[in-house]
Amino acid sequence: MAVKAFLFDLNGTMIDDMRFHIKAWHGILNSLGAELSMERARLECYGKNDELLERIFPGRFSADEKQAMGIAKERQYQEDFRPLLKLIEGLPQFLEKARERGIRMAIGSAAIMFNVDFVLDGLDLRRYFDTIVSADHVSESKPDPETWLACADLLNIPCSDCLVFEDSPKGVEAAERAGMHSIAITTLHSREEFARHPNIRFCIDDYTDPQLDRLFQ
């Protein structure tokens, strides 16, 4: 497989922050009467904020109410995670090596730009990425392939030449539906949870994994 572009999910893939998102949602959803366990909150923590709220409380809130609750959740997440904001181990060196090799890079995230900017500006990463596709840019979130298809289109690179880095089975499924291979990072989900996806080349715990050296050969 010739790799011309690396496409990265953000939360849980570039930064190990998903437990902070889950904690923030767990508190907000249960304050509204959801009575969710932390494990159930973990399983529901994917897609756009308004989609998550609609799954838990179908038809209960208006679009404006869901937007306001989503922003409140993101502010809580950022406050809690800011002192720990850093890239997953090995990723700074991996990004630099990819840039030196001329591999194009993009971010495709279900996060709103408010959160994407929090990470990119907080860690000074914009120089690595040719394009960004967030929840604000798509009508359907993962596992729909729209996010990854948009990344490939904006880079003007065929889907078959793109490799997706993901921490979520839903994101891997989206890549599969876009015709892309994936590397799965096990920050939140186990290897067993990714097992049914044939487009996964291999799983990693972080970016120090020697298997990644194959991508530059």
Image (tube, helix red, strand yellow):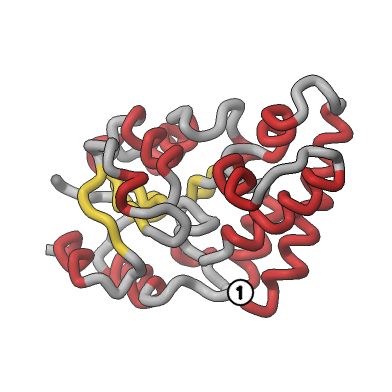
**Can you identify the residue that label 1 sits on?**
85
**Quadrant location, the N terminus:** top left
Where is residue 141? Give x, y as percent.
55, 33
Where is residue 24? Give x, y as percent.
73, 56
Q: How crowded is mark 1: few (under 14 residues within 10 Å), some or many (20 or more)?
A: some
**Would you identify the image quadrant in which residue 79 lies?**
bottom right
Residue at 83% of width from left, 28% of height from top? 63
Residue at 58% of width from left, 49% of height from top? 39
Question: Is 168 on the left-hand or right-hand side of 85?
Answer: left
- Three-letter amino acid code of the residue under disc 1: Leu
Question: Is 69 on the left-hand or right-hand side of 16?
Answer: right
* Picture layout, residue 137 above or below residue 26: above
Residue at 72% of width from left, 53% of height from top? 114
Asked whether 174 or 8 is in front, the reply is 174
**Quadrant location, the C terminus:** bottom left
Where is residue 168? Give x, y as percent.
44, 47
**Would you identify the image quadrant in which residue 145 lies?**
top left
* Picture layout, residue 76 above or below residue 42: below
Asked whether 204 or 177 is in front, the reply is 204
* Picture layout, residue 108 above or below residue 213: above
Where is residue 44? Give x, y as percent.
60, 40
Which structural element holds mark 1? loop
